Every structure is written in structure tokens, then in C-alpha cells.
Image (tube, grey):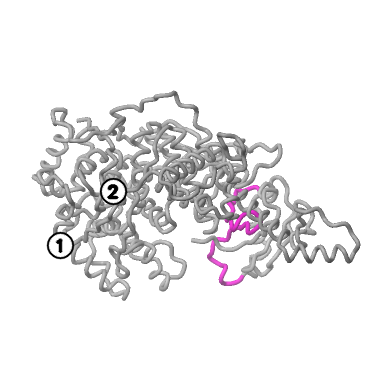
């Protein structure tokens, strides 16, 4: 059956998983009775009911629901979605027996102007709303590409038009903000020519690509038994700038069907440029905050270029538990865990569940799919809450299927979903409205960059575990599509009015999203270099603004004027900027001084040439200090870090060519220290 759904704009979602039908308004109870019970190898009746439901959902004779979805409908054959619906029923039974607590989220309605105001705040441009002259906002605007600038301008225009209609207050004219007298104002944008990875565009320089070798590119999606099409991804140019013009009134493909075979997914490679690749954890928190601003702008511009509306939920703040393990917000869990293990990035209970399954459960047949005992899982849940932090919980008593049940329960009971309530619609839309996997992957990449740090780190740990499950398919009988179907309802189903129809329509879509997340995770947690380039420009603009502000400070100008008169020299032209002495280096061009606090030889001047890599500098320090290194350094992986200048802190790829990095940021300091885990 092909189901259609039109967005009426008036539906208010009232709850999010964990799923408890008794607490969900507007739920069709007749459908609940037809949902199959938990899938178990020993329960043939359960299996039969799962199949019967699947046939019901696939039957062309079944009348369509009361509402329809326009454009595309992702679908699969009936047997391929069987595990998905059995997992949904298993979740329902867990909530009914009281082992899970339902968390209600109230979704707010808002007019278009309010939504755009929130968007401007979320991208770091609250200055456009407040009217204040904030340097960060000006620096951000100065880095935007053509398509990014158009996306910002479109949202700001909608915001101002809405306010004028409401007669709320005087709104700043867009021409006053962006300094143009044209009736159709535009931003001053940066060129869209390719920029070096992790660097700024150097005059007359073109990106240099390395030849393919074992370490020169990032491979994702290759199944050696099932060779697939290979495509190359570029991080050098903004995704939105690289989209070709779409024909007007383009219709998206209807009845889009996914092929469940792993070989249907293409192999993507990301070539390393001379700047190497940068993972999410390689940048400072301050720079990652700017990456999030730019990612939301870029994602919006990307959807605009594709002619797709970027929707997001507007949810009231929800308070979860402040202590315990399950149902506690990730940020609070981490705050509590960091008192015990400083610097930890993934909750301890989540790490322990993953470790338990990796040590004993990866080869268990049907792991994740075959549910554990509901009563045992409930008892283990209560025992963990009481004993985990006292280190008195006996992990040997936990069976593998029960541990998998606890892992999925932890994810479902998060007060806010792992991929955030706000952007769940954007995840769904990227598959429903975008048919090409390469474009889906680019949108998914930006959505991962948008995640809060705690969510992104926890999701990464979870996906790394799922990849290991799939790697053991020969023994556990869980291939990529099986795992994706089981995990999808735990990550993406949320309840509201007409919740059952929404679930049915999103089933294949969410499973496909999970499949992309697992298969291409190495790509998705790599920061696109065009975003890093924009962060560098943003930092440079902020530094220049600070210098100008210093020069025009009243006290400084007065002091300069007096000293000028005393020396009988003509007054300096207003606006002239002089670099302070500490920025004027006496080190020759192409020579850097590298500091290594944990080595016996703590610093060394190194002459760079066109072939010097970061790993060459690390090897030189290791050779010089192989006998005298401190005990603290032994056993730790050392990395070369770029600190200061136009970047906060940047852990360099061992394959990065240092002369190129140095030229992109000549004011940086270079420090060898352990990479943040």
C-alpha cells in the first residue's frame, strides 16, 4: 500500500518515546491490537502475527489512512520490514509492563516569524534580532558563501516581514545591516572557489590531491564480497554550492523503494588533501560551536538549493531525572560521571553495556533482534540503578540478549532522543525528499555536525558497536539491514496524534537512515574542510575587529595623540592597525618551533619543506627523546597540535603537509601532546 500524508500544519505532537499507548492521545486502539507481539525463535505465534501485520501494511487493498503524504513514499517489500514491527511490539510491551517510564514532550506551535527568529539565534546571528553590534555576528556574516548568505537573508526577510505585519516594533532594514542601497539587498559573500582542506584559500593555489594509497583516502561502504559503485566525495567546496540547478516544478520520485542488499549502497571515498582530514574531536569546543552555527546555515542552504523545506520541531523544555542511570539527560549523566572519571565523553553505564556486548555478545545469534526476558531485564534495570555507582553490580549474571535489551532501553528512555527532537523531521525528510544517496549522505553529514557534543559522542560510540555487530554477521546472522531495522524504532519513533500511521510511513525511511549512519560513520564524523576554512576566516575577522576596536578606544586614541604631539610627528591615519610586538616573529620563513612538554627535549626548531608531514616531526621527536621521555608519556599516543592564530586548537592529521598548514596559519604555535580521547 502506498500511503500519502499532507502536512496540515495544525497537528501538535504530545509525546516522545518510550512508547506507552495508554498515555498517547488520539491513538487508534484497534491498530494496537493488531501490532504483533515480541519476535522470538520459540514463539511461532508471535512470528505469524508479525508477518500478518506486515502483509496488512503492504496490501494494496487496504484503504489509505485519513491523511496522506505528498510526493515520495519510501517503501520495502513486506517480508523485509518484519523485524521492524516485531521490535515496535517489543517496545510497546516493555512500556506496558512498567519497566519503562513514558516521557511526555509538548510541542509548541509557532508562526513563521518566531521560527525564523529562533533559527537566527541558533546560527549565532541574534545580533540581527537585537540590533546590537556584536563582533561574532559580523565575523560570521563575513565568511558566508553565496548560497549560505541567501539562506540567511531569506530567513531574516521572513522574520522582518512577520514583525511588520504584527506592528510589534521598528525593524532594522536589511540594507542597514548588510550595507547596500539596492532594493534587493544581498550579503557580501566569500568566493566559492575550492579551498584547501583545513586551511584558507591561498592566492593562486589550487587544492593538491594525493594519489590513492592505503592511507591517502577514507573509504566507506566497501563490501569486498559485493563490490559496489565507487564515488568520490569532496570536502573542498560547500555542499550547497556544488548542487546543480534543479528544473522548475521538479517532482520527486514517488514510491521510492530501497534495496535491502548491502551491495546496493555505493562506496564513497574522501581523498586527503595536503591538509589531511579532521575528526570532530580534533577541534576545540569553541571552534566546534562555530562549526555548529555554520552547519545549520549550510544545511538550510543545502535544502533550499534542492527545493526542500527544512522542518524542525519546536519543543518545550523537558526536565528529566537528575540522578540515576536511565531517563537522565546525557549532559547530567556526564556531569555526574566526570566527577568519577574526569574528561569522560560517553556515559559510564552506556560504555559498560557496550563493553559487555562486545566481549561476549557479538557472536550471539540474533543479538539485538531476539529480546531478552522482560522480567529479567526489569530486575536488572532496578539492580543497576541501585548498585552501578557502588561497583557492586555483578555483570557476569547478565545474559547477552538481556544486555542488548538494557542498551536499547537506555536509548529509548533518554528524555530527549539521541538525534534531538528538533531535527528528527530533518532526518526523515532527507530520505523522503532526496533520492540520491550521495545527497542524502551530505545532508546527514551536516545533521551530525549539528548535534550537541554529548549526543554526537554517544551516537558515535553506539554506531561503532553496531558496525562490529554487522562485521560478525557470519556468526550472529545480523546483516546491515537486520541491524538497521531493529535499531530504527529505538532511535526515531516518536508518538503523537495519528502516531500509528506516522510510524508505518517512516518505517523503511528510518531503517535506511540507520543503515547510512552505520555504513558511512567514518565519513560522517569527519569535519568538512570548507567549514574549517570558514571557521579560520571567522576567527581572523574577529581578531581584526578586536584590533580595530582597540585602536579606536577613546583612551588609546588620546594616549596616541599625546605621544604623537610630543614626538612632533604627524598624526597616524585614523584606522591604521599595527601588529603588537609579540605577533612579530623573528623566526625565519618556513621554520617552526615545536614544543613537547612531556619529552626530555621540550622544544626544537624545524625547517619545513614541501614534503614534511606532521608524522615526520613526531618521529623526529621520538628519535631524539626515545630514552629520556617522561613516564607519563609512555603508552600515550602523541599528536602534533596547531594552537592559536586563526584556530583555537587543532589536532593535525599525521599525513598533513606542514608547510601548507604553516602558510594557512603562520601565527600558530605547534605543540606535541596526547590526543584527546
Query: Does residue 279 appear in the picture of this structure?
Result: no
Q: Is residue 641 magenta?
A: yes
Q: Where's residue 525, x and y in %?
A: 46, 49
Kind of element beneath mark 2: helix
- The relative height of residue 625 versus residue 656 in the rendered view (above or below) is below
From the viewer's perspective, is 359 left or right of 570?
left
The disc label shown at residue 375, or none: 1
Can you tell which quarter of the image residue 356 is in?
Answer: bottom left
Q: Where's residue 259, x and y in %?
A: 31, 32
Q: Where's residue 387, x and y in %?
A: 27, 73
The disc label shown at residue 7, or none: none
* Mark 2 surroundings: few (<14), some (14-19) or many (≥20) residues within 10 A: many
Q: Which residues, given as a range, are shown in magenta?
A: 630-657
Kind of element beneath mark 1: helix
Residue in the picture at 50% in, 49% down: 170
Viewer-proximal residue among 491 and 259: 491
Viewer-proximal residue among 158 and 81: 158
Can you tell which quarter of the image residue 252 is in?
Answer: top left
The disc label shown at residue 487, or none: 2
Amino acid at each position: 500500500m502506498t500511503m500519502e500524508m499532507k502536512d496540515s500544519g495544525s497537528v501538535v505532537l504530545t509525546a516522545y518515546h518510550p512508547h506507552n499507548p495508554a498515555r498517547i492521545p488520539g491513538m487508534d486502539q484497534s491498530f494496537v491490537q493488531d501490532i504483533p507481539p515480541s519476535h522470538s525463535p520459540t514463539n511461532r505465534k508471535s512470528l505469524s502475527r508479525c508477518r500478518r501485520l506486515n502483509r496488512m501494511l503492504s496490501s494494496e487493498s487496504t484503504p489509505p489512512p485519513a491523511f496522506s503524504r505528498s510526493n515520495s513514499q519510501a517503501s520495502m517489500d513486506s517480508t523485509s520490514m518484519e523485524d521492524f514491527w516485531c521490535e515496535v511490539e517489543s517496545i510497546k510491551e516493555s512500556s506496558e509492563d512498567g519497566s519503562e517510564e513514558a516521557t511526555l514532550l509538548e510541542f509548541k506551535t509557532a508562526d513563521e516569524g518566531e521560527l525564523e527568529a529562533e533559527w537566527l539565534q541558533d546560527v549565532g546571528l541574534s545580533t540581527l534580532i537585537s540590533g546590537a553590534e556584536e563582533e561574532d555576528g559580523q565575523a560570521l556574516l563575513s565568511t558566508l558563501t553565496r548560497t549560505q548568505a541567501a539562506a540567511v537573508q531569506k530567513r531574516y526577510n521572513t522574520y522582518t516581514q512577520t514583525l511588520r505585519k504584527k506592528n510589534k516594533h521598528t525593524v532594522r532594514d536589511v540594507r542597514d545591516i548588510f550595507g547596500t542601497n539596492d532594493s534587493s539587498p544581498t550579503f557580501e559573500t566569500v568566493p566559492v572557489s575550492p579551498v584547501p582542506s583545513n586551511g584558507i584559500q591561498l592566492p593562486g593555489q589550487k587544492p593538491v590531491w594525493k594519489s590513492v594509497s592505503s592511507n591517502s583516502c577514507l573509504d566507506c561502504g566497501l563490501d569486498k564480497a559485493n563490490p559496489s559503485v565507487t564515488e568520490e566525495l569532496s570536502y573542498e567546496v560547500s555542499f550547497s554550492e556544488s548542487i546543480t540547478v534543479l528544473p522548475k516544478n521538479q517532482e520527486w520520485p514517488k514510491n521510492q523503494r530501497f534495496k535491502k542488499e548491502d551491495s546496493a549502497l555505493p562506496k564513497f571515498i574522501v581523498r586527503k588533501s595536503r591538509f589531511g582530514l579532521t575528526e570532530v574531536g580534533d577541534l576545540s569546543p569553541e571552534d566546534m560551536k562555530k562549526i555548529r552555527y555554520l552547519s545549520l546555515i549550510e544545511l538550510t542552504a543545502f535544502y533550499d538549493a534542492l527545493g526542500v523545506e527544512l522542518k524542525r520541531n519546536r519543543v518545550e523544555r523537558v526536565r528529566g531525572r537528575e540522578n540515576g542511570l536511565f531517563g537522565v539527560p546525557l549532559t547530567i549523566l556526564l556531569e555526574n560521571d566526570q566527577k568519577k572519571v574526569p574528561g569522560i565523553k560517553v556515559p559510564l553505564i552506556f560504555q559498560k553495556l557496550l563493553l559487555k556486548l562486545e566481549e561476549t555478545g557479538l557472536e550471539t545469534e540474533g543479538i539485538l533482534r531476539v529480546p531478552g526476558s522482560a522480567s529479567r531485564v526489569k530486575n536488572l534495570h532496578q539492580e543497576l540503578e541501585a548498585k552501578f555507582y557502588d561497583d557492586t553490580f555483578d555483570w557476569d549474571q547478565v545474559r547477552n540478549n538481556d544486555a542488548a535489551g538494557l542498551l536499547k532501553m537506555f536509548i529509548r528512555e533518554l528524555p530527549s532522543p539521541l538525534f534531538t527532537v528538533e531535527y528528527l523531521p530533518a532526518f526523515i525528510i532527507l530520505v523522503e525528499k532526496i533520492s540520491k544517496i550521495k545527497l542524502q549522505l551530505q545532508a546527514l553529514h551536516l545533521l551530525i555536525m549539528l548535534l550537541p557534543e554529548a549526543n554526537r559522542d554517544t551516537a558515535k560510540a553506539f554506531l561503532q558497536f553496531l558496525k562490529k555487530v554487522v562485521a560478525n554477521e557470519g556468526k550472529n546472522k545480523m546483516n546491515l539491514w537486520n541491524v538497521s531495522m531493529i535499531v530504527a524504532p529505538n532511535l526515531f519513533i516518536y508518538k503523537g496524534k495519528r502516531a500509528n500511521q506516522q510510524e508505518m510511513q517512516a518505517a523503511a525511511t528510518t531503517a535506511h537512515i540507520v543503515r547510512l549512519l552505520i555504513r558511512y560513520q567514518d565519513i560522517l564524523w569527519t569535519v568538512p574542510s570548507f567549514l574549517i576554512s570558514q571557521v579560520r576566516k571567522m576567527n581572523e575577522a574577529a581578531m581584526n575587529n578586536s584590533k580595530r576596536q582597540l585602536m579606536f578606544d577613546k583612551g588609546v586614541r588620546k594616549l596616541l595623540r599625546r605621544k604623537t604631539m610630543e614626538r612632533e610627528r604627524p598624526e597616524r591615519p585614523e584606522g591604521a592597525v599595527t601588529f603588537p610586538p609579540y605577533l612579530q616573529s623573528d623566526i625565519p620563513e618556513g621554520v617552526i618551533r615545536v614544543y613537547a612538554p612531556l619529552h626530555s627535549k621540550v622544544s626544537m626548531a624545524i625547517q619545513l619543506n614541501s614534503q614534511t608531514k606532521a608524522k615526520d616531526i613526531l618521529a623526529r621527536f621520538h628519535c631524539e627523546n626515545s630514552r629520556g621521555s617522561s613516564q607519563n608519556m609512555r603508552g600515550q599516543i602523541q599528536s602534533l597540535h596547531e594552537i592559536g592564530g586563526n584556530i583555537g586548537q587543532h589536532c593535525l592529521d599525521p599525513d598533513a603537509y606542514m608547510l601548507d598548514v604553516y602558510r594557512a596559519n603562520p601565527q600558530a604555535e605547534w605543540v606535541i601532546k596526547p590526543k584527546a580521547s
